[in-house]
Amino acid sequence: MKSVLVVGSANMDMVVRVDKYPLPGETVFGSQFGMYPGGKGANQAVACAKLGMKTVFVGKMGDDIFHERLIKNMKMNGVIVKDVLIDPDSPTGVALIYVDSTGQNEIVVVSGSNMSMKPEDVHKKNQLFSRASVVLTQLEIPVETVSSVAELAKKNEAVFILNPAPACIIPENILNKVDYLTPNETELSLLSGQDVNDRNSVVSAARSLLDKGVKNVIVTQGSRGSLLVNANIVQEFPAYVVKTVDTTGAGDAFNGAFAYGLASGKAVHDAIPFANKVAAFSVTRHGAQTSMPTLHEVNRNNFK
């Protein structure tokens, strides 16, 4: 059966809307405050599930009220959460998000229980990898745990997508198992150790990761769309033009939709523009998981 396994983080996002970000030492008034389910792993799982794919989420949360709200929301959106782990000694992760009048955001993450997810926790869920068409993970859990995810994905012949966010140095024993690496330009620069400031430098940095064993690099570039680089091709996929309200979760919308596309049998050249369209839809709404569209919503919108 076609399915996506998402292994990663779940946070409660605490969002403040401001006209402008405060300078150091400055106090500004916010116009709105809200709490929204978030975390890159949970966001990507919700994005995939809302599109209609069987989606299983594995993460670790604290034994607290945030955990209860996060689980309830994922269930409402169709994510299978029976394999979520509980850490009685660490709080559920939180993210403090500031969104300005242009829709851009600044985020501070306090990882909590996400960082207590160990390799042995993943290995105990080995049966889930044997049932998955696509495995998707990020870097809001420990790198050694990501390594176990990569190992089990390859062992079970699943397509392995790594969204390297937030960026950190990734060992080659992980990179050489990655089928699709999906950095933004900032993450690409850190991963490659190269400055990224134009198309040529993006391609050069992406190719340096191919040299480390990654099969495909898909660079997400916001309003400029996405760029696919592999051993055979460099191809641009333009973004859809929309009125941006809130960019929170746009990258997660892309990754969840891309995983959906591959698991549902789309070729990569069809899965990327589909993911671009889902990401474009998400920035027209507030929040992360609340902004993820259904397949019906995506299909009825004629973005250009």
Image (cartoon, rainbow, N blue to C red):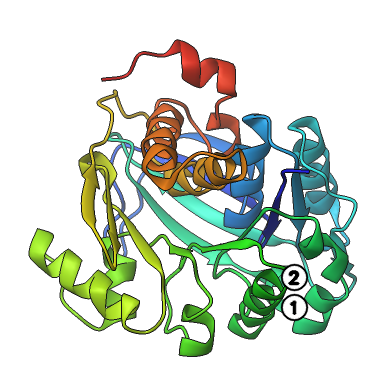
Taking depth in this image into account, of 109 and 271 the one nearest to the observer is 271
| Badge number at residue 158 | none
Is the residue under label 1 in contact with that under label 2 (CB below 8 Å)? yes
The residue depicted at 23 percent of the width and 37 percent of the height is 238
Do we see residue 198 in this rendering?
no
Residue 304 falls left or right of residue 57: left
Residue under label 2, please give it.
113
Q: Is residue 240 above or below residue 98?
A: above
Q: From this view, report whether residue 292 is shown above or below residue 45.
A: above
Image location (x, y in percent) of residue 132: 74, 55
Percent of width and height locating residue 273: 36, 36
- Look at the image and tell me whether residue 251 can be seen: yes
Q: Secondary structure at mark 2?
A: helix
- The amino acid pointed to by label 2 is Ser
Q: Nearer the viewer, residue 95 or 239?
A: 239
Side (left or right) of 63 relative to 241: right
Q: Amino acid at mark 1?
A: Ser
* 120, above or below 113, in the image: below
* Count of marks placed on residues: 2
Residue 91, image x, y percentages: 77, 66
What residue is disc 1 on?
A: 116
For this view, does 18 lie left or right of residue 40? Answer: left
Residue 117 spot, x, y in % from top left: 75, 75
